[in-house]
Amino acid sequence: MAVCIAVIAKENYPLYIRSVPTENELKFHYTVHTSLDVVEEKISAVGKALVDQRELYLGLLYPTEDYKVYGYVTNSKVKFVIVVDSSNTSLRDNEIRSMFRKLHNSFTDVMCNPFYNPGDPIQSKAFDSMVSAMMVQAC
Amino acid sequence: MSIPDYMQCAEDHQTVLVVVQPVGIVPEDQFFRIYKRIASVSQVSVRDSQRLLYIRYRHHYPPENNEWGDFQTHRKVVGLVAVTTCASAKEWPQTADRFHGQKEVFGATLYDSRLLVFGLQGEIAEQARTDMAFYPSFDRCDDVEKRVEDFVESIFIVLESKRLDRATDKSGDKIPLLCVPFEKKDFVGLDTDSRHYKKRCQGRMRKHVGDLCLQAGMLQDALVHYHMAVELLRSVNDFLWLGAALEGLCSASVIYHYPGGTAGRTGGRKPSIAQAADAGKRHRPGAQEVLIDPGALTTNGISADTSSEIGRAKNCLSPEDIIEKYKEAISYYGKYKNAGVIELEACVKAVRVLAIQKRAMEASEFLQNAVYINLGQLSEEEKIQRYSILSELYELIGFHRKSAFFKRVAAMQCVAPTIPEPGWRACYKLLLETLPGYSLSLDPKDFCKGTHRGWAAVQMRLLHELVYASRRMGNPGLSVRHLSFLLQTMLDFLSDQEKKEVTQSLENYTSKCPGGMEVITLPDGLKLPPVPFTRLPIVKSVKLLNLPVTLRPHKVKGLLGQNMTTKSPFIYSPIIMHNRGEERSKKIDFQWVQGDVCEVQLMVYNPMPFELRVENMGLLTSGVEFESLPAALSLPAESGLYPVTLVGVPRTAGNITVNGYHTSVFGVTSDCLLDSLPGVKTSGCTVEVVPALPRLQLSTSLPRSANALQPPSGEELSSSVSVQLFNGETQQLVITLENIGTELLETLEVTSKTVSTKEKLFGEFLSWDLDEALSQFPLKPGQVVTLTVSIKVKLDFSGQENLLQDLNDDGISVTGLPISSPLRQVLKPRAESKPVSAESGKAEYNHIKTLEAILNFKYSGGAGHVEGYYRELSLGVRVDVEPSVLFTRVSTLPATSTRQCHLLLDVFNSTEHELTVSAKNNQDLVLHPSECQRMAIQVDKFDFDSLPEPDAERARFANPKQLEEERQQAQGCEINSKLGIRWTIISFPWVPGH
């Protein structure tokens, strides 16, 4: 389904990043890193309008030749980025939304762990397996 | 047209293109000096009209781009300024030919041209020619700008005439079809009489006139013409030219909405009002009359007419529409493969407009589109240019990461394997520019605060690339700096394997170019601050150590008190005390001594998965001259906290502050300042250094004691000796004091203190004569002084009072009495208030008693002495006293003389040696071990009362008990002097006394 899933801290450094073709991980690092520009732009644009009723889902950040990059921002400014293959046309906006929702729920669980220090890389096995499940689903 | 001009922006549509080129041999720097002066004439206000003419100068322009001049007139080279040098008249014809040759290149489109000749003087130079200007040298050409203005005006005249020509040419019998180069063959054999064809011709011509109007400064007319062109061309589906007409419309609207320009060039455009205001002043007498139809000016020119204002508002596109039309235009361009450059340039222009409008998201869409425009086979250089400009545009819309990404791609392109001569320098320069995009600064100070922030994976990659590029550039110093930075800041993110690799390559580089602490300044002015390895090893705590006990300086008390009073006039003030407390928090309450080795203890930790060799580790201090004695250490892999002691010698007196330490790791020397180290525990770093003091080394004739004396309270002993003596024995202790320091030893004071003991001690335990030693003072360094101390032990080994009573009563011999029975030993000894005779009484034998005393040597000299400091040596003396001769029974018998009596003493030898006992006027008595014999001594009778009473002064302060003791002691002495009893162990060479 997804080829890369990343969780980015408020200060724009990765808390978690995983991609399916692991041999070219750095490429996804760059993809996700550059997508932050769009995320920031979108946040600042929304910020002007309504802060309270903000939509967490940011939609398609940008399409590249091979991938589509979707973004999602929690209220605490933690960003989720999902990269999917462009050729995968079966994925609708709704599916992407539900993926983000799942991701957010799982992330909330991670944050609830009293032994997790906010700002540290996520090493939770439960989170990892959830991400794996999302990646494998349609692949 | 294959070479896009990425710098184009919407307002370039209103400029006329002038090419400035060197002809013949012109020094490059001179040419660019002149070029800059020419280019400064970027806008000219045309006389007698309020119109402004904008000029775009190029020193290089591909002629194939010129062929698109009909499509968009701003692409047409209309002016040529040639710059040449000519030394003599002889060369002149050749130079003139060259100029004409140059004109031929752009000949079809040129309106006018000029030749600037430098260096030529004489007949030719004097002839007045409008198309040529002669200057004696590059430094003497004051009116170049004026010449250029005149030239621009002449271009304007041609432009204006062309505009009027085309605009009024409405007869319509035969409008020529304007076309772009690649279209020409398409129209061969087309029916030129069809309505469709005519409309196409009309539309294109309208668009062309619009371009000319825009260039001539008639915005309003341009808008009208563009609108008409759009309508005409849309009806005939002439998409390429429709796109151009739409773009023209956009350009004109942009010029209207954003008079400041969209390119963001420095300086920008001068406000046109100011330009118009001084237009009149610039009217010069004798200049050419403007050949403009006055009627055309009033009807079409920009005037104060309100009707034209309304028209403008109607025709002009709104900011939103501009983007819509740009999108449309680009989509039309996109239909033509050969118009890729036009499409790309349109994208770039649109992005610039969007950047002004702060619509970053839409701008990024345009850019995204631009990325995919295929321009066919691009040369490597063009690719670099393209990526660079994409990066610049992303930067413009605030997408710093994207910008950095493309810049990095451009950098990589500079050194692509296909390039025969990789441009590592350019690559490095571009990589440096990407740093902000990856929120990476090359100053390690930005990283020491708290945890690392940023995308470590991409930052590390970039640093690796910087290292590699700088190495290939042939600047190992830079590589070392970047690699050090990588190691220092990214340590947490490096895997063990990477740590090994990075350090290995760092060692390789440093073998060629050791890393240091200097700031590296790059040619473009960027400064690379030094990277101290504060984490190799990690220092956890810094502790200044006191000097060893024997070397600690002490302040003479009286002086200390004075110092205290001088600090503040108040005896006590809570506020001042509080302030002082804070001030003192960093100051330590001991002192170091000038010239003596001082120590600082660091707790260090090696985070590397391998052994870390730290060389040349020393202290960084300020305040006084300090000679650091560096240490080398090797820390095991992932060591725990590891203590390291750094030493040094202060060379002057004053306050010294330990600021940090320096190390050399992997060939990189670093100065680590404690201030910039997070999480270093320190108990203060400032300590006072007192002036130099002498140093004494103490050695004794007696063996050192294995078990050191336990000092009474807080004191530490420098050394201690122990000796075993029989009761009553006297031993000489020779103490040798050597001045091992560098200062003169001026004073020496010796005191002794007996460690409190319950034993009763008779006589002086330790006695010495200092005068002989002092006579040798001052003692120079290296000299030795000896001091003899006599150790005399006289202890009471007598038993208890009741035992004595027993003996007196029944008079039995004590030989064989189990005196050492446990019963006796548990009985508490009572030393005080014993009868005088008990002094030579009986006691428990075979019981060793211990006496301990401390000899203190206070000494000083040199500068420290002047300041009131002294040093102290202390020698512990421990004496194990064995019982020797015991008098088990005392009685008297009257002698023959009434003034004398016989004193009968039962003498018991409690030693394991045969000994002799002698008294005054008596022969020796030989005693075998554990033998008891009676000896009789004839003595004069005497009265204790005859002894002098202690003086009244002392009696007043002492209590009766003390007085009593003193009296007893005096009486004991009296008896001793009368009797003079001595004993000698026969097998021992020395003569102890009792």
Image: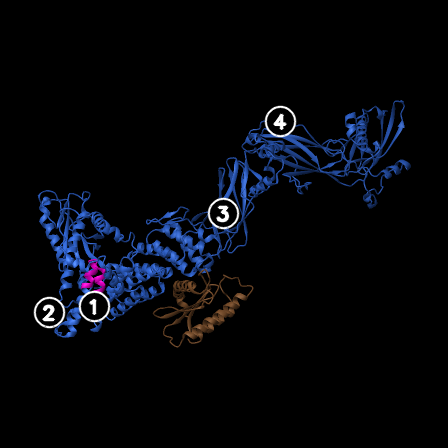
Chain colours: A brown, B blue
SS category of the residue bearing label 1: helix
SS category of the residue bearing label 2: loop
Which comes sooner in the sequence, label 4 or label 2? 2
Circle nearer the viewer, 3 or 1: 1
Residue at left offset 15%, top offset 61%:
B164
Distance between the Cα atoms at labels 2 and 3?
87 Å
Q: Residues within 10 Å of mark 3 (few under 14, many from 20)?
A: few
* Vertical arrangement, residue B28 with respect to residue B371, above or below: above
In the picture, the disc for residue B774 is: 4
Circle nearer the viewer, 3 or 4: 3
Spot occupied by residue B82 in the image (x, y as percentages of width and height): 16, 52
Task: Report the residue that reaches farthest toward the right.
Answer: B810
Q: Is residue B211 magenta?
A: yes
**Where is mark 3, residue-wise?**
B675
Residue B20 seen = yes
Spot occupied by residue B70 in the image (x, y as percentages of width and height): 17, 64
**Where is mark 1, residue-wise?**
B229
Distance between the Cα atoms at labels 4 and 2?
134 Å
Which comes sooner in the sequence, label 2 or label 3? 2
SS category of the residue bearing label 3: helix
Q: Magenta: predominant secondary structure element?
A: helix
Decide which of B795, B49 is in the foreground and name it: B49
Residue at left offset 40%, top offset 71%:
A84
**Where is mark 2, residue-wise?**
B173
Amino acid type indicated by mark 3: Asp
* Vertical arrangement, residue B99 with respect to residue B629, above or below: below
